[in-house]
Amino acid sequence: MAINYQYINKDTAIHHLNPLSKLAWTIVIIIITLTYNNPIYLLLFFCSLIPVIFTAQIKAEWKTTMKFSLLLGLLIIFINILFSQYGTHILYQLPFRIPLIGSPRITLEAILYGLGNALRLITIISAFIVLTLTTHPDDIMLLMQSMRLPYKTVLLTSLSTRFIPTLAKDLREIREAQQCRGLELHQKKLLPRVKSSGMIIIPLLSNSLDRTVQIAEAMEARGFNTLKSRTSFQQIRYSKIDFIMFILIISCLIFSLWAYWQGWGNYQYYPTLEKLFSGRSDYVVLGCLSILLFSYPLLASLKRRTEFD
Amino acid sequence: MIRIKDFSFFYADSPKPALENINLTINDGEFVIITGPSGGGKSSLCRCINGLIPHFYGGKISGRVEINGLDTIQHKTSELATHVGMVFQDPENQLITTDVEREIAFGLENMSFPHDSINRKIEESLDAVGIPHLRQKQISELSGGEKQRVAIASVLALHPRILILDEPTSELDPKGAEEVLNVIKRLNEELGITIILIEHRMDRVIHHSDRMIVITNGHIITDENPRLVLSNGHWEQAGIGIPPIIQLTHKLKEKGFNISKIPLTVKESRIILGNIFQEIIPRLKTDNNHQTNYQKGKPVIEITKLYYTYPEGITALNNINLTIHSGEFVAIMGRNASGKTTLARHINGLLQPTHGEVIINGVNTNKKTVAQLAQSVGFLFQNPNQHLFADTVEDELLLTLNNTNMAQNKKELRITETLGMLGILHLRHSYPRSLSGGEKQRVALASVIAAQPDILVLDEPTRGMEQRRKDELMTFLEEYRNKGNTIIVISHDVETIARYSDRVILMSNGHIVADGNKHDILSGSLFFSPQINRLLQTFPQYNKIQDILTVEEIMEYLP
């Protein structure tokens, strides 16, 4: 099953959000996930994504990505168990020696540390998936343009995303044509495999070059580069709710950084696991963070509703 | 108004002129068709009119081209964009953005129009080509015909008074082509836009055009009203294809019939040729049996209870049962998404059945890989560019032969033989990708038949081809068939199928809806009848000629 990370056109509250809010939200989620290391807090960040994914109706695509990220997460846990020897709760000591590593012991601390990091990873991937699946690439381009990036750079990036599916189709057809000419593409030997992949790249490149010339002609014929300035039809509209959302996202960032600086959510795995909750104040901070994070999908739905009225 | 005076042009690397001494004036509101063999200079002429020559291509130039009084040497293509719009062949390669609205806005943004005015112009141009309902769509959701109409709308948004279209339908199926041609006709008639159209499918457009220009070897050899061009012999000399009813008219004239004018459409031909047929039909020979029985050998393809469902859940084939024998020339026809290509892909194992079985020469396709099956089933894709990988034509054939267990010394002989059969022996050491379109197609075909497969499957081999090349290809396939091989062609091209195939399979929604002799399937059908048959369908009382499909057949009947 191929992983889909490309924009899907749907009519949902998240799709209708301002690209700037979505970008800011993604960045904030990534920053706070990387800052905090208490697993309870990390779990909260992960859970806060779930209503967003459901609202955006991208559950199926998200699930396929999750399969892949869970695999990556397991790998992180496994490597951490093997290499990290600091914990004090020894669960099992391997009876044999591995060169360079020695005789590893499996500790509870290492397992939990691995779990925490795996959770971080899947949270970041999910936040990113939400952004790319629900935001039109051209909207992101528009955003970059409004951030004063030169138009030609932005156009180039947008063109290359536009032609990814075409390139994939070309690739499939060339491989099929070669199979039809009697070439075994699933060779086991390395040398013929390298040779046959060269034979795929040459026609692929040459087709793309032809395409480039045609695109350039078409752009020229539609007045590209005539005037120094150009207008932009698509504009990012900022409504009152967008403004509120933006304040919400920023305050979420400021609050979480302040709380972390004050010592909440900082968790020591090694040498012995700390208590997950250091006191009642933890519940207060967690509560505030949940309100801030969960109001994001709520405000998005509200915005959608007000637009309809 | 377009004024071209003493114009010549050489591409930068060529000693031969692409255009030589062209003098041409095109007035506002005219509908001009440009035709001629490929490589003759049609596309170059169009690119001169919108300034892509010399600004984009460069090269040597002499003479003048003026568009509405603007010299194309002093004004860049992008400046001319508000005077001349250009639509290209492949819709895929001229759409720049990912959705319809942005696509149409692109040109307007370049011209720095304010937001409100862009908004209005998008709506107007979508209306002009009849697709306002597609405004919010993604480009990837559209059909070929719709994409090409978006391309036209995006050009129209800049309000050019001249529209150039370079083979706009060659990548489209008949339905898409018709949509596009209808739009072009409407733009000319209702908005008075000057149309310059390069087109091979003349039967749908000649009657709308005012002028027809034939270009070969960089020269304009004729420039007149289409009826005049088609009555004199210039078209024959240029090797361009003309609709069958016009061919018939010429043949009848040669036989001494008195015909006042050349009919351009089937409707006109019923009127103009009506009297002649009323008179000659009773005198037709009746002993002539055109239902020739071709040599049919042993079954080579046996398909039983074949079902196929794509991974996305779409059922493309629904209980297909089919036997094809050696020596048959079979055409598979049907609308888009009727299952034609899916069926063909089962014959060489590119797809494996969800249910049922496909047996090739007695062996089930699931027992072999695609590469192994390639020894007995040759498969040619529509685009020859996808077929060419090697450095020389010779290597291209060797690539195929190296996958067979043929002795080294025989390979040499086989290459010479194959290239000779296709008349491309002189290209043996050329680089395949630098050849012309027709030559590429032949090299691609050579690379497939070098292995001498006894079944040859071709996907849309004649799409976008000019008549002369079509005839060459089909004649070759006929010869190959006569050696006892089986030919299967997927095609929309009714006229070509009517001339060359024996058996027609008609598909719809994953079912075979008709399968039999071409005379039974193609005659009297509403949608898939060739022109000659549609002409004869109006004389139902003469049922002995009901199933005539081609000009050749009707001429055999004449006394």
Image: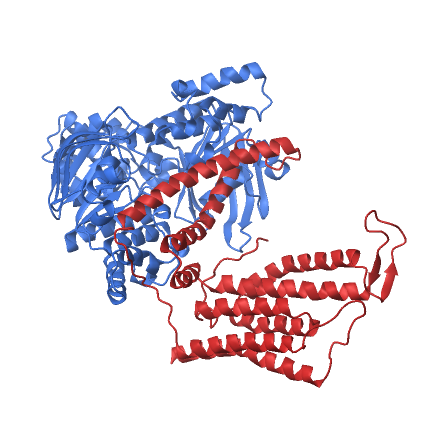
Which residue sits furthest front? A261
The quarter of the rendered structure image containing the N terminus of chain B is top left
Query: In the figure, is residue B277 to the left or right of A153?
Result: left
Visible in this render: residue B285? no
Q: Nearer the viewer, residue B146 or B477?
A: B146
Q: Position of residue B126 (x, y in %)?
A: 27, 59
- What's the colour scheme? by chain
Chain A shade: red
The quarter of the rendered structure image containing the C terminus of chain B is top left
Residue B525 to residue B255: above or below: below
Q: Nearer the viewer, residue B180 or A77?
A: A77
Query: In the figure, is residue A209 to the left or right of B13?
Result: right
For the image, the number of numbered tags is 0
Q: Position of residue B525 (x, y in %)?
A: 32, 45
Q: Nearer the viewer, residue B260 or A305?
A: A305
Occupied quadrant, residue B259: top left
Residue A11 to residue B321: above or below: below
Occupied quadrant, residue A116: bottom right
Q: Position of residue A277 (x, y in %)?
A: 73, 79
Q: Nearer the viewer, residue A17 or A175?
A: A17
Occupied quadrant, residue A306: bottom left
Query: In the figure, is residue A76 to the left or right of B261?
Result: right
Visible in this render: residue B115? yes
Q: Residue at x 59, y 34 (%)?
A: A194
Q: Position of residue B170 (x, y in %)?
A: 32, 41
Residue B459 to residue B429: above or below: below
The chain letter of the blue chain reads B
Q: Residue at x 39, y 76 (%)?
A: A239
